[in-house]
Image (tube, coloured by chain):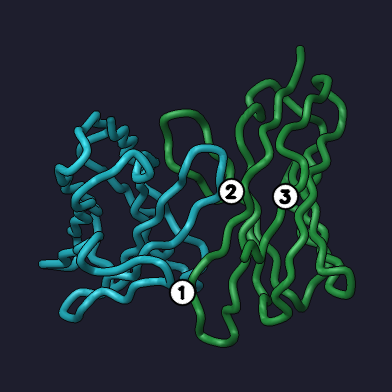
């Protein structure tokens, strides 16, 4: 199993500002995923970040709002830009299992963001 | 459009009894299903999965049943223990279509009463 850490664990930010969330994995992985969980809702995939290529964004998410970096095989960042209260969510990164079935993803502990 | 639905937001069960969590999906391309468990302030942890070629998978106290014709799956926990109190998420993917993305339900909060 992979050990995943995220920084910060939580933050309270003012609207109009930006926050960068870091995700560190203890092993090299090709794929990393970023999810959002809004209050009372399911986890929604924001984008898939592959090392060496541009992130692939899901419908409803754009690079200008959620720029992603993937500088190496163990690290990724997600920035929530020009925040509004609607961005208040838990943001999670995940990586595929090493079993070969990438569906069984390991998740980080999440970053709880509150935008005031 | 929510492709994976967990219609029961919460479930309360007596310790030692069976917990049954239900999940429905709409996308017929889904062929791999997973259950995740989440404690407060932690990320979801993988619990059990099932491929569409099976209708049942068992792992200790946890059993997942899949009814493809009804596009329905369920998770049975027996016997339920206080440590099982958590939020349970159902997830699905179209693995054989090389789509590794997971679609999640909204979760069911399980409370096991002593």
Which chain does the numbered disc 3 sit on? B
Decide if residue A16 is on the left or right side of residue A47.
left
Question: Crowdedness of circle 3 by 10 Å Cα count: few (<14), some, many (20+)?
Answer: many
Residue A30 falls in image quadrant: bottom left
**In the rendered image, the vertical position of residue B87 relative to residue A34, given as above or below:** above
Q: Disc 2 or disc 3, which is closer to the eye?
A: 3
**Where does label 2 land, which residue?**
B36
Q: Residue furthest left?
A: A71
Q: Under tag 1, what secondary structure?
A: loop
Q: Which mark is residue A100?
A: 1
Please state the total of marks drawn on the protein image: 3
Q: Provide residue B111's location: percent of width, then percent of height.
A: 71, 24
Q: Provide residue A33's location: percent of width, then percent of height.
A: 35, 63
Residue B84 falls in image quadrant: top right
Residue A109 makes an appearance in the image: no
Q: Disc 3 or disc 1, which is closer to the eye?
A: 3
Instruction: Please identify the quadrant where the N terminus of chain A is shown.
Output: bottom left
**In the rendered image, the vertical position of residue A39 relative to residue B114, given as above or below:** below
Which chain does the numbered disc 1 sit on? A
**In the rendered image, the vertical position of residue B103 relative to residue A84, given as above or below:** below
Chain B tint in image? green
The residue under the point 31% across, 36% down is A113
Residue B83 makes an appearance in the image: yes
Which chain does the numbered disc 2 sit on? B
Q: Under tag 3, what secondary structure?
A: loop
């Amino acid at each position: 199993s992979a050990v995943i850490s995220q920084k910060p664990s939580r933050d309270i930010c003012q609207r109009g500002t930006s926050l960068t969330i870091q995700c560190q994995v203890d092993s090299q992985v090709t794929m990393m995923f970023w999810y959002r969980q809004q209050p009372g809702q399911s986890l929604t995939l924001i984008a898939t970040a592959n090392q060496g290529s541009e992130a692939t964004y899901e419908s409803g998410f754009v690079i200008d709002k959620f720029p992603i970096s993937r500088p190496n095989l163990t690290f990724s960042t997600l920035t929530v830009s020009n925040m509004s209260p609607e961005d208040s969510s838990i943001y999670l990164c995940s990586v595929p299992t090493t079993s070969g079935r990438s569906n069984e993803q390991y998740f980080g502990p999440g970053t709880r963001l509150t935008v005031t | 459009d929510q492709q994976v639905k967990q219609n029961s937001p919460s479930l309360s069960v007596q310790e030692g009894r069976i917990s049954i969590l239900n999940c429905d999906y709409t996308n017929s391309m889904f062929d791999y299903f997973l259950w995740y468990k989440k404690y407060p302030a932690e990320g979801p942890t993988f619990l059990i999965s099932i491929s569409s070629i099976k209708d049942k998978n068992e792992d200790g106290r946890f059993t997942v049943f899949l009814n493809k014709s009804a596009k329905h799956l369920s998770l049975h926990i027996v016997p339920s223990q206080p440590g099982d109190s958590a939020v349970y998420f159902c997830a699905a993917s179209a693995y054989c279509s090389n789509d590794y993305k997971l679609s999640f339900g909204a979760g069911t909060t399980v409370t096991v009463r002593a």
